[in-house]
Amino acid sequence: MLLPFLQAGRVEAGCDEAGRGCLAGAVYAAAVILPPDFRNEELNDSKQLSPAKRYKLRSIIEEKAVAWAVGIVSPEEIDHINILRASFLAMHRAIDQLDVRPQHLLIDGNRFTPYPNIPYTTIIKGDGQYMSIAAASILAKTYRDDYMKQLAETYPEYHWTENKGYPTKAHRDAIRKYGITPYHRKTFTLLPEQIEIAFSPEN
């Protein structure tokens, strides 16, 4: 069972992102404030859950949460500011949209760009420890999956319905065959050959 809060009696928002390691698509983040008495034994880090369970929990989270929101940073913005900063910006955009202002932020991971006037705590693997972070991980993951499935309707050859933009063999084979789309992150190593070229003695 995950922990309900870091400090009792405080309005805490859990924050997490999805899609940081992908070769294509936006990065998504969510911020979730759960009620103090919220309990759900199925709630866990989204990576530990089946897709069906994630979507079932998303409905529960959206219904029961005091406030929740999703923030998005585009592939173009990722290429401009780098993926780490883009992940934090997506969290900031989610926090911006919360109907209730949190008193404290619980951030999954070990780094964060401070949000104005709200203190925070970073927690490594926090999505497997605190309910609000786990809830944020589920929202970020499912909303990003929906987005990648929608993009896959236009670009079916990249198999985004299955790989969600992550660097699978099928995805990289498609890049070799068809090139890149407007949704690929151009500053990422899209193909392993890029590394070989970059470190070639002839260069």
Image (cartoon, rainbow, N blue to C red):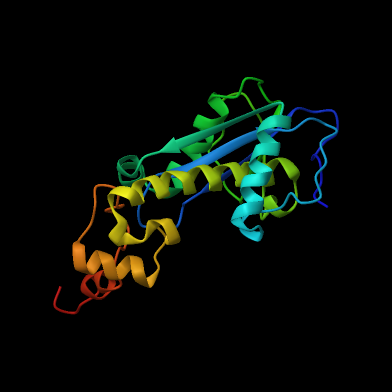
Q: How many marks?
A: 0
Furthest-bottom residue in this view: 201
Furthest-left residue in this view: 202
Residue 9 shows in the view: yes
In this view, the residue in front, 55 or 112, is: 55
Apparent side of residue 173 relative to residue 102 in the rendered image (left or right): left
Residue visible at 23% across and 57% down? 180
Apparent side of residue 40 relative to residue 137 in the rendered image (left or right): right
Residue 120 shows in the view: no
Q: Quadrant of residue 135?
A: top right
In this view, the residue in front, 50 or 32, is: 50
Please provide percent x and percent y for residue 140. Answer: 55, 43
Please provide percent x and percent y for residue 144. Answer: 48, 45
Please provide percent x and percent y for residue 143. Answer: 51, 42
Of the 4 image quadrants, the one containing the C terminus is bottom left
Residue 195's place in the image compared with 14, above or below, is below
Residue visible at 53% across and 34% down? 70
In this view, the residue in front, 53 or 35, is: 53
Residue 95's place in the image compared with 200, above or below, is above
Q: Quadrant of residue 192?
A: bottom left
Residue visible at 48% across and 49% down? 145
Please provide percent x and percent y for residue 79. Answer: 31, 46
Residue 113's place in the image compared with 148, above or below, is above
Residue 47's place in the image compared with 26, above or below, is below
Residue visible at 54% across and 25% down? 96
In this view, the residue in front, 107 or 119, is: 107
